Image (cartoon, rainbow, N blue to C red):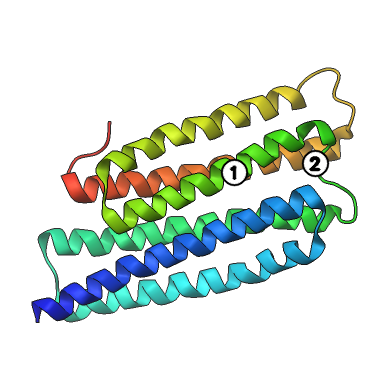
Amino acid sequence: MRSVFQDELDNVSQSLVDLTAMVSASMTKATTAILSCDLKLAEEVIATDVKIDDYQHETDSRIIDIIARQQPVASDLRALVTALRMGSDLERMGDLAHHVAKVARLRHPNAAVPPELVSIIQAMGVAAVAITEKTGVVIATRDTQMALEIERDDDVMDDLHRKLIAVLIEPTWKHGIETAIDLTLLGRYYERYADHAVSIARRVYFLVTGEYAS
């Protein structure tokens, strides 16, 4: 019976890793869509968000079923409850990639990002995908040192976000209020995306150590 239960726990963990890969792919495509004005790719990301939501809901249902049938206690219960919360964070990350794609669709065929800000948005996209891929490894391995690294990786995103805002509030800004709002939202989407990855890393750290990362 314990072997069957362990298999179920392992399957839940693998589902979260799979969800991480789906979210990472969506953000990669969303960033490409926003920078290249690719409507087809933006639509693909928007459609994929439904699949991410469905996958997360199915994973949640399995976790709840395991809790009901197995009535786990102590570390096993903590692992399952933590998995529910991580799934919610990943679903929200998928939503944020979806939001980036919606900005691309809204402004098509025009560019949502002015040429002088392409490098910052591109860097934010790269940072987002890197932090997601590391999050998947942390979920799979429960590597607490790597979990702590994600906190530092988030600092990169925060720095990029500050640089973006600094450009938007310059008196020399010449692209109008609408573009400034779009970019403010985009910056927030990427920044919050990384914050959810940090939240997952903290949950894994607590799951392994029983302590909150300082």
- Within the image, what quadrant is residue 108 found in? bottom right
Q: Nearer the viewer, mark 2 or mark 1?
A: 1
Up-down relation of residue 9 to residue 26 (above or below): below
Q: Residue 174 at what x, y percent from top left?
A: 90, 27
Residue 126 tag number? 1
Q: Residue 66 at what x, y percent from top left?
A: 23, 77
| Horizontal side, residue 210 vs residue 164: left or right | left
Instruction: Name the residue type under label 1.
Output: Val
| Horizontal side, residue 126 vs residue 83: left or right | right
Residue 104 visible at all: yes
Q: Which residue is painted at 30% across and 73% down in the image?
A: 11
Regarding mark 2 in the picture, which secondary structure is present there?
loop
Q: Residue 109 at what x, y percent from top left?
A: 90, 55
Q: Which residue is painted at 77% across and 47% down in the image?
A: 35
Q: Are marks 2 and 1 in contact (CB under 8 Å)?
A: no
For marks 2 and 1 on the same chain, the one whose residue lies earlier in the sequence: 2
Residue ID for mark 2: 113
Q: Which residue is painted at 57% across and 60% down in the image?
A: 25
Near mark 1 (Cα within 10 A), the count class, few <14, some 14-19 or many ≥20, is: some
Regarding mark 1 in the picture, which secondary structure is present there?
helix
| Horizontal side, residue 4 vs residue 63: left or right | left
- Within the image, what quadrant is residue 7 found in? bottom left
Q: Quadrant of the C terminus?
A: top left
Furthest-top residue in this view: 171
Near mark 2 (Cα within 10 A), the count class, few <14, some 14-19 or many ≥20, is: many
Up-down relation of residue 182 to residue 103 (above or below): above
Q: Residue 168 at what x, y percent from top left?
A: 76, 27
Up-down relation of residue 117 to residue 2 (above or below): above
Residue 94 visible at all: no
